[in-house]
Image: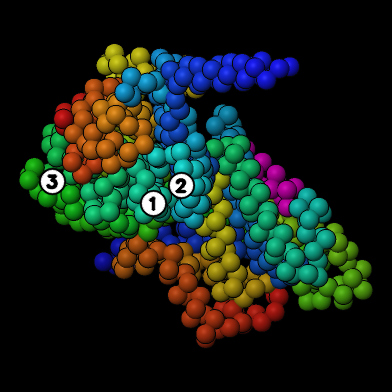
Amino acid sequence: MLLDIIQTGLDGVMVGSLYAMVALGITLVFGLVGILNFAHGQSVMLGAYVCFFLVSAGHSFWVGAIVATLAMGVFGALLERAVFRRTLGDPFAGLAVSLGLIMIIENVAAAALTPDPRFMDAPVSGNFAVGPLLLSSQRSLVFVISSALILGFWLFLQYSTLGKAIRAMSQSRQGAALVGVRVDTVSRSIFAVGSALAGAAGALYASLFAVTPFMGAAPLTKGFILAALGGLGSVPGAIAAGFLLGLAESFGSRYLSASFRDGYGFIILIFALLFLPTGLFGAGKARV
Amino acid sequence: MSGMRWKGLVAGVLTFALAGSAALGQTAGVVKLGYVGSLTGPHSGWDVPALEGMQMAVTEINGAGGFKVGGKAYRIEIVQEDAQSKPDAAATAAQKLLSDEDIHVVMGVLTSVPGVPVATQMAKAKVMYIGGFTAMDGIVGKPGNELSFRALDTDDTVAKGFVPVVVKELGLKKVGILVPNDDVSKTFVKAYQPLFSQAGVEVSMVEFFQPGTTDFAPVLRKFQGKGLDGMFIGYADPDAEAIIRQSLEVGDLPKKFVYRGGSGAPAVKYADKIDGFVWQILTRDLASSSDEKVKAWIDRYKAATKKDIVANTYWALTFYDAVFMLGKAMDAAGTTTDQAAIAAKLKGMVYDGVRRMSFDKDGHAVTDVDIGIIKGGKTYSIPEKVL
């Protein structure tokens, strides 16, 4: 029984690290720019396709994942420049635009790539034993990569110049501008970094699950639950919430019912909103 | 011009017009055939091939001079609407077809979510409807649905021949069932579970997962350590492939899969890693058939669509033969508009087309199907005689 609990917990942590990566991008953009970017899930989907096509063309998964991350970073920067910059200060306009983008990107992808699900060859397959535990090789790899990316992102925020500028902007956009932070550049960087993380998450999703034009919906929904659960704008909150959701889904599916899998996240969210309305760490306002 | 000459001219024109209309009467009439299906969205993988098959049948019938009713030739014209893989769009699409008073028969929809509102509206409007989705099994034959038909066999019909073949081919003794939590699954689990027991196979656990699930690892853990030698899974290709792939990832799970689905595609990539995969081909096996009728149809399909045969192509046979049957039923009924009379002739008719098919007294299809098998790295099919 204990072994089973540990195994289930590891499953939850592995998939939770992916959820955390998606939630990071959402919470970052909202916390700093005030826009709920619903099109974030589309960056996950497009990143997954970029990786899938590169791997299918004979490139390694690593090339696919890196190109997907960079391509989505550029995509995010372009979106900020062409669309979201014009909606700054008007969250509802930003929301409406991002909803429109979902429809456009999703349907263009379905028309161009067909809605058929595609499965990519993972760089590693099968499983390996750690004592009595049997671990999936690819899931373990995904966990290591996503944890490294999350850690790297946190270090970037704490110690890099741009990271410090982002943190300054999160406290006060006007104050940051007054002390010389180029808020336009930082805003674009936030979109680029958030979208790049989504692209990386997409590549990792593609190594585990089916790639379809409609795959962005699930990570997006979960990402928003997590962003709200962690406290909108809170990076540590989003990370913790990602792992919490992964664990809740894993234990819920294993010991309760797999037919209610997505419900567990919402139950946690409802309890969090009732008892921790400012997020897991009491963020209250943007905190990176 | 004198009055006499005017009268003569008018008489001449009228005579010519009457003669012309009589001559037109001898040329082909037109029967409008409605098609509703998901031509866009995630369900288009089923309904686009289904429409292609229907278009092929229509092209072939029209190319041969149409079909005859009471000695008069009729050609078929398809009026198509997109259900967009959504129930609300499907309802709107059905309404559009129903607003055309010249459409007396509608075909289409292979998936239940958009299919149910279509079937419901057709039944309310008392328009003959031939669908393909599984939930139709709960609609066809019920009061008020006398004009509803399903062009694919029911689970009860298929399962009776399928389960013994599966048990024999895979040598099963103990299986677990893992299917989506929906009405379709609950219906077919009821059909299959007793048949496995009758075949001497213990069904030790049944688990339903949330439709749309991508991560199966936690629920697959429930099947570990149960001594299973097979998994019965359903019913969509992405779910089936994800379950196979993740079973191999998670480990300590059976490597024989019985698929209540219509394609071998989910297992193809894993053929050398699994011990067996058996699926239902509800029309005909297009990948490895030795049947000359099937081979000829494949050639015609490629020529008509400029497409190669892929995993989903066999859905193109869902309505292909049904279109020919419809023409024969109209001829036998002596009408292209009296739907009750046409339906009565369609029920009980046996048609030996690419599929050998029939409709029972309620409107359920009873057709021969093929059973696809991947075993030992080889792919082959076994015909299942139902008729």
State the mark number for residue B196.
3
Question: Where residue A28 sits in the image (x, y, percent)?
Answer: 69, 66
The residue labelled by disc 2 is B98
Q: How crowded is mark 1: few (under 14 residues within 10 Å), some or many (20 or more)?
A: few
Disc 3: host chain: B
Give B119 or B73, whichever is nearer the viewer.
Answer: B73
Kind of residue sitting beneath label 1: Ala
Kind of residue sitting beneath label 3: Phe
1 or 2: tag closer to the N-terminus: 2
Left or right of B169 on screen, residue B29:
right
Give A58 or B166, whichever is nearer the viewer.
Answer: B166
Element under disc 1:
loop
Labelled pair 1, 2 in contact (Cβ < 8 Å): yes
Q: Residues within 10 Å of mark 2 (few under 14, many from 20)?
A: many
| B3 shown above or below A189 | above
Q: Residues within 10 Å of mark 3 (few under 14, many from 20)?
A: many
Residue beneath the point at 47% across and 69% down: A265
State the mark number for residue A139.
none
Kind of residue sitting beneath label 2: Leu
- The secondary structure making up most of the magenta span is helix
For the C terminus of chain B, give its image quadrant: top left
Range of residues picked out in magenta: A61-76
Disc 1: host chain: B
Please tell me if label 1 and label 2 are on a single chain: yes
Q: Is residue B121 visible?
A: yes
Disc 2: host chain: B
Element under disc 2:
helix
The residue labelled by disc 1 is B125
Q: Can residue B35 be seen in this view?
A: no
| B232 shown above or below A267 | above
Labelled pair 1, 3 in contact (Cβ < 8 Å): no
Residue beneath the point at 47% across and 53% down: B91
